[in-house]
Amino acid sequence: MTRRIVIVGAGQAGLAVAMQLRRLGFDGDVSLIGEEALPPYQRPPLSKAYLLGKLDDDRLLLKPLDFYRDQKIELLLGARVEAVDLAKREVRLAERLLPFDDLVLATGASPRPLPAEVGGGLAGLYYLRNQMDALRLGPELQSGRRLLILGGGYIGLEVAAIARSRGLEVTVLEMADRILQRVAAPQTSDFFRKLHAAHGVQIMESAGLLRLTGNGHVSGADLIDGRQLPADLAVIGIGVLPRTALAEAVGINVENGIRVDARGQTSAHGVWAVGDCCSLPFEGRCIRLESVPNANDQGAIVAHNILGMDRDYLPQPWFWSDQYDVKLQIAGLNQGYNRTVVRPAADNRSQSVWYFENDRLLSVDAMNEPRSYMLARRLLQKNASPRFEQIADPEFDPATLL
C-alpha cells in the first residue's frame, strides 16, 4: 500500500516538511491541509512590506501553485481538521476522512485575545497574524487617525513604524517596565525607544490597561492610573498562544506547546510536530522558537526522521525585525544571560548588544550592524565564545576568534 503523510497546517513549517520529503525521494502521498484560502505564504512581510502595500499576493507566496502539482503535494485549502483518530489513523475534515501513516502537526499559533471584560469585543480592534488580518488593517491606517497599540513587542513596534510612515498618531501601551522586556536587554529597549520617539511615537511603559472604551467601536482607553487616551483604532499585540487543541484532544503531551523530542516526535507514535505550535528541547530546557528559520530547519529534520533517518534537531536560533530604516538581526537566544556589553558603531544609528552567561556568549542583537550579526552567528555555530572582557574592550576584534 502507498504510504501517506498528512500535514496539518499549510504554513512555513508544514511546507518545509512536504518539500523535504520530496527532496529525499519519498514517492508516497503527501497531503498539506490549510485553513486559509491562500497557499503557503510568508508571514514576516505582513507587518512590513505587505502591510504597506508594497508586496502583492503572488510575491507573498512561498511557492507558485504549479509547484504543488509538479511535486505531487495534495494541497487542501480552506479546510479545517475537525478531529484526529489515532486508533484508525484518520484525520476528519468536514467532507472527507483522510487516512495517514504519519501525521505532522504544524498548526502554528494564534494571537492572544484581549479579554471581553476589558473591551475585547469592541469593533475597531485588529490583530496581525495572517493575510486577512493585514488586509483588514491596511486600509484603516489613514493619515491623521489615532492608533493605540497594546503591547511593545516586535509586532507592535513594527506596526507603529508602518503607521507613522502613513501619518497616523501612534501610542504604544506597554504594561511591563519597558518595551521588548521579554525578549531583549535594556540597552536594546533603549535603542528602539529612542528610535520611535524620534519618529513621533508616544511610548507609555508600566502602563496598565483598565479597559478600552467606546459605544460599540473603540474610541479610547482608560488606564489603571486614571489617565485616558483617545483612539480611532487599536492593534492588539500581546503575544501568541500555540495551537494545541488537536493534540490535547487525543492525549498528546502538551507543555508550552505540543511537546516533542529532539527528533520532532510527539508522545504519540507516528505523530510529529513542527514550528510555532511545538515546544522542543534546547540546552536542557523546553522552549518554543517562533521564527521562520526554525520552521524551515525543524521541518527538514522531521522529514528525515519520518523516513527513518534518525536525526536530532540542533537549533541555531536567529531572528530579525525591520523598523523604519533600522534592521535588527538577532543571533542566538539570550535566555539565561546575566551581563551584557554594548559595542557602539561610529554613528548612533547602529550598535550591537552582546549577551553573556558569565563568560559564555549566548546571543547578539545587531542594529544596522550586519558584520556583528554574521560574526556572532559563526561564533555560536562553532561554539567559539569570546571572553566577556574581550568584547568589553572596544579595541578587540571578535573576528580574530574565527
Image (spheres, rainbow, N blue to C red):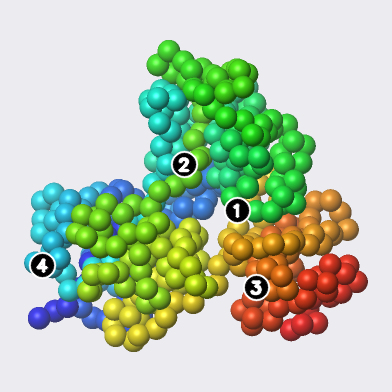
| Kind of element beneath mark 3 | helix
**Position of residue 342 measured from the top left corner of the image (x, y, whole percent):** 79, 59
- Looking at the picture, does residue 11 appear above or below residue 171? below
Task: Say whether disc 2 or disc 3 marks the residue closer to the N-terminus.
Answer: 2
Local packing at callout 1 (Cα closer than 10 Å; few below 14, some 14-19, many 20+) is some
Describe residue 312's horizontal placement relative to residue 364 as left or right.
left
Q: Amino acid at mark 4?
A: Ala
Residue under label 4, please give it. 87
Q: Nearer the viewer, mark 2 or mark 3?
A: 3
Tell me if residue 6 can be seen. Answer: yes
**Rendered image: mark on residue 119:** none
Q: Nearer the viewer, mark 1 or mark 3?
A: 1
Instruction: Give residue 273's quadrant in the image.
Output: bottom left
Q: Amino acid at mark 1?
A: Val
Local packing at callout 3 (Cα closer than 10 Å; few below 14, some 14-19, many 20+) is some
Identify the residue at image location x=87%, y=74%.
Answer: 396
**Front-lying residue, 389 or 323:** 389
Task: Say whether disc 4 or disc 3 marks the residue closer to the N-terminus.
Answer: 4
Q: Amino acid at mark 3?
A: Arg
**Front-lying residue, 197 or 184:** 184
Identify the residue at image location x=59%, y=35%.
Answer: 175
Q: CA distance from mark 2 to mark 3?
A: 29 Å
- Looking at the picture, does residue 165 appear above or below residue 248? above
Residues at discs 1 and 3 in contact (Cβ within 8 Å): no
Residue under label 2, please give it. 128
Q: Quadrant of the N terminus?
A: bottom left
| Kind of element beneath mark 4 | loop
Q: Nearer the viewer, mark 4 or mark 3?
A: 4
